[in-house]
Amino acid sequence: MSESSDADPIATVRDRSPLLRTYAERFRDQTPFSDLQIGVSAPLTPHTGLFVEVLAAGGGEVLVVGEAGSTHADVVASLEGLTAVTPLARSGMSAAELDERRRDLLDREPDLLADDGAQLLRTVHDEFPDVAAGIRGACEQTTGGITTLEVMDESGALAFPVYDVNGTPMKHHFDNVHGTAESSLTAITSLTNAMVAGAVAVVVGYGHCGRGIARKLRALGAR
């Protein structure tokens, strides 16, 4: 690990993300989020940290809450050093504390929301209807979250447009195929201490995620 990545937990992800670096450079010139508050609720990993950096580069004021059990203390410390970012999270916080931090974020009346799991979006509709009425739009990452929001939309309860990140071709053909396979098999091997090579593997379901996992298993020597 380089000295820079030791000091900056986001450095390695930043170095490996040329597209996001390009957007950050473009946003610094165009400032598309100038005078806007953006609320982000997602696991506070280095990847989320880079996403927040890009939003801040666009001139926005970014308010960030993490997820219980997946908030990295070093990422929080790194984001605290950015003038346009306010982390409302800490490593090891409970689910109850996380709910309170989401409410603190919504108390500040953000203009845009980026969610992972739709909990922030449900909270703003259930508990902050006046804030929801002023939100320009949001995005949601997960299939489960989108399913909930679709039900809300059908009943006329959705107060603002929400972009379905999980429904994009990039998500299907890249993240679902490659990212899901990588993270799933890394978790399995680390938790079980099992060797994939020579094992007989069964993949149930053969959509984008299933195909990616099957290809990864084959590449690692499984049958």
Image: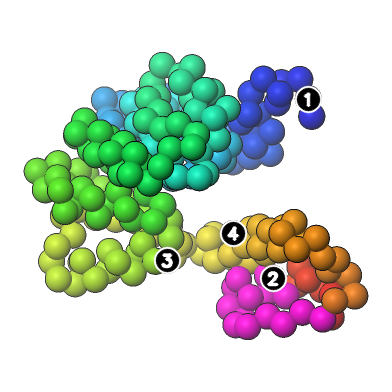
Give the label on residue 126, or none. none
- Give how far across and how far down residue 134 sits, in percent: 14, 42
- Give how far across and how far down residue 70 sits, in percent: 52, 44
Q: Please tell me in which quadrant of the rendered image residue 36 appears.
A: top left
* Residue at numbered disc 4: 175
Give the label on residue 2, or none. 1
Q: CA distance from mark 3 to mark 2?
A: 18 Å
Above-or-below relation of 52 to 28 = below
At label 3, the amino acid type is: Thr
Whichever of labels 4 and 2 marks the residue nearer the N terminus, that label is 4
* Residue at numbered disc 2: 213
**What secondary structure is found at the residue carrying circle 4?**
helix
Q: Which residues are magenta?
A: 200-214
Whichever of labels 1 and 3 marks the residue nearer the N terminus, that label is 1
Q: Contact, CB < 8 Å: mark 1 with mark 3? A: no
Q: Is residue 218 left or right of residue 77?
A: right
Front one among 128 and 37:
128
Whichever of labels 4 and 3 marks the residue nearer the N terminus, that label is 3
Q: CA distance from mark 4 to mark 2?
A: 12 Å
Q: Please tell me in which quadrant of the rendered image residue 191 appears.
A: bottom right
Whichever of labels 3 and 2 marks the residue nearer the N terminus, that label is 3
Q: How many marks?
A: 4
Looking at the image, which residue is at 18% across and 59% down? 158
Whichever of labels 2 and 1 marks the residue nearer the N terminus, that label is 1
Front one among 100 and 176:
100
Q: Nearer the viewer, mark 4 or mark 3?
A: 3
At label 1, the amino acid type is: Ser
